[in-house]
Amino acid sequence: MNIHEFQAKQVLARFGAPVPKGQVASTPHEAAAAFTTLGQPKAVVKAQIHAGGRGKAGGVKLVSSADEAREFAAKILGKPLITHQTGPQGRVVRRVYVEQASQIARELYLGMVVDRKAATVSIIVSSEGGMEIEEVAAKTPEKVISEPIDPLVGLASFQARKAAFALGLKDKQVNQFVALATSLYKAFWATDASLIEINPLVVTADGHVICLDAKMSFDDNGLFRHPEIRELRDPNEEDPAEIEASKYDLNYVHLDGTIGCMVNGAGLAMATMDIVKQAGAEPANFLDVGGGANAEKVAAAFRILLSDERVKAVLINIFGGIMRCDVLAEGVVEAARQVQLKLPLVVRMEGTNVDRGKQILKDSGIKVITANDMADAARRVVEAIGGRGANR
Ligand code: GDP
Ligand code: MN
């Protein structure tokens, strides 16, 4: 789960990280009032969407009066902002963050991520802040420094100092950076975060090291431990199909292909995606309906995967263990009737009550292409959309 910049800054501030003072606003009037409340000669008004690149896209503006804050807020609120991270449709700006302006002397980069290779959280720094870090890493990898953090020890101060020196920080700024990085790591650990990105981390004209931007992502599987973080979820920023799926406790991830997949068990779901690819098409989703799914849940899953307009055919691959094939078949029939299914449907099932399941499908009058095994199922579903490489 991702959260907005203003929320990330609130979370980080709770752990002692230095962030500029600010106030969130959802109307131009509120933006003007926020400027007045801050009581500073200058403020920045920043579009709050779950995407970076706002600066370049015109979503960040330095303002010097309440009127200017109101005007800029009126200009961007309620409209989509298109950045290099949003895709061509952009993301609608529903709130702006009005923040006291900082005078920037240097823009640096500081990140913390779950580093799968090192099997730890790693701290990443670069002197090239304010730009896309992916680009810096691709063009000048020597300018991106990464250091794994021992989970038992935490961020050691020698590591934080090393990062500070790599950033060219001196004197008091080294200590400020060490304190800042330490509070970020505490926040990361305490909230089950998966990413914290401060881009840019700035040295201000008067020599302070502060977080000028903040991005935080969390491990969804850890959210039950953090109700206060879970509350920060913004459904406007999420895929409606994924929100619907989470209501039914379905593990659904939207992808770009054309084969809608319904599978039980994460391992089988992964294998199904692989075999669809091998047969020459792309999966439209990952969907694990889970072991103990009932007909209602199966029907919901079916509706969700069909809500994707790119789906050209459906592949159901179920191994009935705890999940019984007859229950699955009932759910599929119910959902297929509800949505008046017109797409080709390939079903491969095996396991408990498989004969009864097949009979239910047969008696339903729904057109079903039955497959003998997984490879056969993949072949048939790819055939159904016009063969290998179709609809790419
Ligand atoms: P992003 O473009 O979505 O990553 O948004 P950022 O929060 O990183 O802001 C983009 C850029 O706006 C920064 O790199 C800064 O150059 C500029 N900016 C943001 N806040 C301030 C500020 O308080 N003062 C000044 N002078 N520039 C700012
Ligand atoms: Mn940024």
Image (cartoon, grey):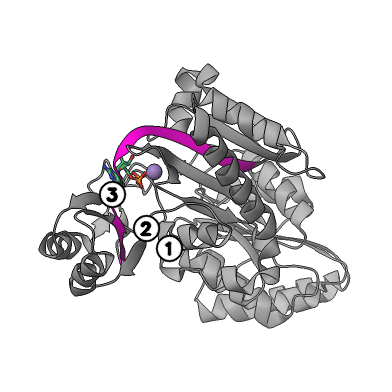
Asked if residue 85 lies left or right of residue 318, the reply is: left
Point out which mark residue 49 bears.
2
266 displayed left or right of 89:
right
Residue 220 occupies which quadrant of the picture?
bottom right
Task: Indicate the quadrant containing the N terminus: top left, top right, bottom left or bottom right.
Answer: bottom right
Classify mark 2: residues with Cα within 10 Å, few (<14), some (14-19) or many (20+): many
- Check whether the beta carbons of the residues at disc 2 and disc 1 lie within 8 A of each other: yes
Mark 1 highlights which residue?
A: 237
Mark positioned earlier in the residue sequence (2 or 3): 2
Q: Residue 82 got which mark?
A: 3
| Distance CA(mark 3)–CA(mark 1) | 14 Å
The image shows residue 199 at horizontal and vertical percentages of: 43, 41
337 above or below 71?
below
Q: Nearer the viewer, residue 331 or 1?
A: 1
Q: Quadrant of residue 291?
A: bottom right
For the residue marked with disc 3, what is the amino acid?
A: Ile
- Residues in magenta? 94-113
Q: Name the residue: 44% across, 45% down.
A: 210
Query: Which residue does the image show at 51% across and 35% down from the upper left?
Result: 172
Asked if disc 2 is less than 8 Å from ligand 1, the answer is no
For label 1, the crowd category at 10 Å Cα-Cα, with few meaning under 14, some 14 to 19 and many 20 or more, is some
Instruction: Please state the horizontal and vertical placement of residue 294, each as a whole percent of the image.
Output: 74, 80
Residue lying at the far front in this picture: please name it: 171
Q: Secondary structure at mark 3?
A: loop
* Element type at mark 2: loop
**Amino acid type of the residue tagged 2 in the rendering:** Ile
| Alpha carbons under labels 2 and 3: distance apart | 10 Å
Q: Main secondary structure of the magenta part?
A: strand
At 51% from the left and 29% from the top, the residue drawn is: 171
User: Does the image show residue 307?
Assistant: no
Residue 42 versus residue 128 in the image, above or below: below
- What amino acid type should be assigned to the residue bearing mark 1? Glu
